[in-house]
């Protein structure tokens, strides 16, 4: 099976840029990706930060769908734990009606911001008891036009307008827990190597996902690897063109772990949590170099983890160099198509 290439653009606000520039650059990159033949283009969700412009992926997705022609466009991902599955389904059902068979809905497990922004998203209400697993089950029903709320006051409710081809639902994560969640629900799974930079852990989580996969309505395991890369014409030129951020992980006394891009935000998360915490420092997972250097690594990573698709994010400051990076990478994969063997899931249970 050949390896597909996709893009995650986080709409990073680099020093000296306005947020208007950042969002315009995201649109520009999406158009280029569409022309180059990338498979999908995803945007992220972050809150309470002036370094990322993507706080409303649904709005940005709608704009990108209108600005492109064939590429799939979606979220990487919506933080469902903050929202009503019914409302999220309504938004993505509208998008799927406007652009049939082009919309993806990736669901993230991270908070997407600091505790105070999470509290603001809930309108100051306490954390609800509904688990993410239950919310995903509800969301899948609403996306497919299945009546939800059986045995409750919501029984018979549908999230109109129901599309003929609903948005494709994905679980995003960087741990064994997220792999188990996706496998149990029979959903596609994306492992974020740019959040957890350990390739062996990625391989283990993706293998665990395939081994434990439970088919739902005929679904089959679909595993994807997301990573961070910067490509230039030479290895030397690649030095310094991208922000090479180390990873900082806030580990709360309750056992919860939250991965954040810088130490200051990681410390602030710990303070706002109201719990005791420690900070874990991990090296940057950015892969950089010439297209031959990066291309070989990406293919080896795909082979090692057994995935058929790579979603690449590229924290390159200059938009022209960012576009050049993705152009070089796509040319490399087009010129050297590689076949990889994707492991078959052990579980074949159908529910």
Image: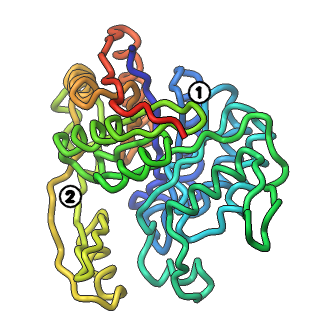
In percent of the image, x 79 and y 35: which residue is there? Answer: 164
Element under label 1? helix
Can I make out residue 18 in this image? no
Q: Establish if 57 lies above or below 248.
A: above
Residue nearer the viewer, 203 or 112: 203
Residue 128 percent location from the top left of the image:
55, 80
Left or right: residue 317 versus residue 96 is: left
Whether the residues at callouts 2 and 1 have beta carbons within 8 Å, the answer is no
**Which quadrant of the figure has residue 167?**
top right
- Crowding at dot 2, Cα within 10 Å, few <14 / some 14-19 / many 20+, comes out as some
In percent of the image, x 18 and y 46: which residue is there? Answer: 198
Residue nearer the viewer, 138 or 106: 138
Q: Which residue is tagged 1? A: 34
Element under label 2? loop
Q: Quadrant of the C terminus?
A: top right
Can I make out residue 145 in this image? yes
Q: Which residue is tagged 2? A: 246
Q: CA distance from mark 2 to mark 1?
A: 31 Å
Residue 346 percent location from the top left of the image:
33, 30
Left or right: residue 80 versus residue 323 is: right
- Disc tally is 2
Residue 273 percent location from the top left of the image:
35, 85
Q: Quadrant of the N terminus?
A: top left
Residue 330 percent location from the top left of the image:
41, 21
In percent of the image, x 41 and y 12: which residue is there? Answer: 334
Residue nearer the viewer, 238 or 275: 275
Q: Say whether disc 2 or disc 1 marks the residue closer to the N-terminus.
A: 1
In percent of the image, x 65 and y 47: which residue is there? Answer: 61
Q: Establish if 107 lies above or below 104.
A: below
Query: Can you tell which mark lies on residue 276?
Result: none
Q: How is the image coloured?
A: rainbow
- Crowding at dot 1, Cα within 10 Å, few <14 / some 14-19 / many 20+, comes out as some
């Amino acid at each position: 099976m050949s390896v597909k290439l996709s893009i995650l653009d986080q709409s990073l606000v680099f020093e000296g840029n306005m947020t208007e520039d950042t969002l315009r650059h995201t649109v520009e990159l999406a158009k280029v990706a569409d022309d180059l033949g990338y498979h999908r283009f995803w945007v992220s969700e972050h809150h309470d930060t002036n370094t990322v412009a993507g706080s409303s992926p649904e709005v940005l997705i709608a704009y990108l769908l209108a600005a492109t022609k064939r590429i799939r466009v979606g979220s990487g991902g919506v933080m469902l734990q903050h929202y009503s599955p019914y409302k999220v389904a309504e938004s993505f059902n509208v998008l799927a009606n406007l652009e049939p068979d082009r919309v993806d809905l990736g669901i993230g497990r991270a908070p997407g911001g600091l505790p105070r922004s999470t509290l603001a998203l809930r309108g100051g209400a306490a954390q609800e008891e509904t688990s993410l697993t239950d919310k995903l089950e509800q969301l899948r029903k609403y996306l497919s036009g299945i009546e939800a709320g059986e045995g409750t006051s919501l029984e018979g409710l549908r999230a109109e307008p129901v599309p003929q081809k609903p948005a494709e639902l994905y679980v995003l994560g960087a741990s064994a827990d997220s792999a188990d969640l996706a496998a149990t629900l029979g959903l596609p799974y994306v492992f974020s190597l740019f959040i957890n930079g350990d390739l062996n852990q990625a391989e283990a989580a993706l293998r665990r996902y395939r081994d434990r996969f439970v088919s739902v309505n005929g679904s089959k395991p679909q595993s994807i690897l997301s990573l961070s890369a910067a490509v230039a014409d030479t290895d030397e030129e690649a030095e310094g063109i991208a922000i090479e951020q180390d990873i900082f992980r806030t580990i709360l006394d309750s056992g919860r772990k939250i991965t954040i891009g810088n130490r200051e935000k990681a410390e602030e998360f710990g303070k706002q949590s109201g719990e005791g915490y420690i900070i874990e420092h991990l090296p940057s997972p950015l892969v950089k170099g010439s297209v031959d250097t990066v291309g070989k690594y990406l293919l080896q990573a795909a082979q090692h983890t057994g995935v058929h698709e790579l979603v690449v994010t590229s924290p390159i400051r200059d938009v022209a160099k960012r576009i050049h990076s993705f152009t070089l990478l796509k040319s490399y994969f087009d010129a050297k198509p590689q076949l990889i063997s994707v492991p078959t899931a052990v579980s074949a249970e159908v529910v």
